[in-house]
Image (spheres, rainbow, N blue to C red):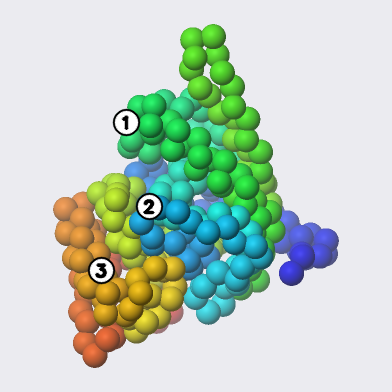
Amino acid sequence: MSIPARQWALLEERSQRARTQPGAGPSELNDWSDSVRRVPNVALRSALFAAINKGPRPYLERAEIQSQKGNTIVYTGALLDQSDLDVWQTVVFIACVRNKGAECRVTAYQLLKTLGRTDSGKNRQILDKQLSRLKATALQLRSGDYSYEGSLIQELYREHCADRTRSYVIRLNTKMQTLFSLDQFTQIDWSVRQALRGKPLAQWLHGFYASHAAPFPLKISTLHRLCGSRAKSLTDFKKDLRRSLDSLSKAGDEHGQPFSYSIVDDLIRVKTTPTPSQRRHLADRR
């Protein structure tokens, strides 16, 4: 699944065209609000960042990750979770918005603060492990006509100052911009996601449904497969699913993002609050 040079050239040309269109592409990455995080749809509509709880995780070798039709992911590395997604999307946010480029220079304190975590020795150790885990990844992604092959973090440097302040220099692969082209990403409401911290399935559902302008009905078994749940049975998963959907509905209402759902005959129907760009997309389809 390696990407030919000609295809890279075409993607670069497409990205260059996007840079001349207001609000249309990866050049707009450094022009978004602090209240949102931009995440590629391929990451939100798959088990790349699985809805799993804390605990031991397997190491995957060129494993095909479950994803929605139209996307393919081949992954090598430790299994990632929703907490890892928090770190990665925050690194992307700092690199593109605050540092205006593909490099994130930040102290451990600043990174933990942006993540909404307390600055403690334990949290610094957890953050260190997560950054190393994100660095030690190899992906081959394809979403429609867009492809990316590389790591989630290209380079990672740790700097120790005389006062024992820990700082990081984190570099992203510039080719990753293809994952943020045109309609390939979703703006995730950060306040809602933060309200769901510690509830991995609720966070996954928030991202998954936010990535669809008009969510279509899905079977419980489909969500079970896509989110990477470790529930041993659909009955167990259904219980967790209801709790997670209730948590998402509550968090959405509290932050002005109404979310409702119904489950009939193992089919889930969801109603969300479309973003302005999603509303324009729906209007164009009429």
Question: Which comes sooner in the sequence, label 1 or label 3?
Answer: 1
Q: Residues within 10 Å of mark 2 (few under 14, many from 20)?
A: few
Residue 76 placement: quadrant: bottom right
Q: Is 233 rendered above or below residue 59?
A: below
Check disc 1 and report the residue beneath it: 118
Residue 54: give its label: 2
Q: Nearer the viewer, mark 2 or mark 1?
A: 2
Disc 3 designates what residue? 240
Q: Residue furthest right?
A: 5
x then y, percent, for residue 43: 50, 61
Residues at discs 1 and 3 in contact (Cβ within 8 Å): no
Where is residue 99? Give x, y as percent: 54, 32
Task: State which mark lies toward you, 2 or 3.
Answer: 2
Tell me the element at label 2.
loop
x, y (%) of residue 156? 62, 35
> Residue most toward the bottom?
265
Quick one: 10 or 128, which is closer to the camera?
Answer: 128
Q: Quadrant of residue 115?
A: top left
Q: Amino acid at mark 3?
A: Asp
Residue 257 visible within the image: yes
Of callouts 2 and 1, which one flags the residue occurring earlier in the amino acid sequence? 2
Element marked by disc 3: helix
Q: Position of residue 166 (x, y in %)?
A: 51, 22
Residue at 37% x, 82% y: name it: 221
Three-letter residue code for mark 1: Thr
Mark 1 vs mark 3, foreground winner is 3
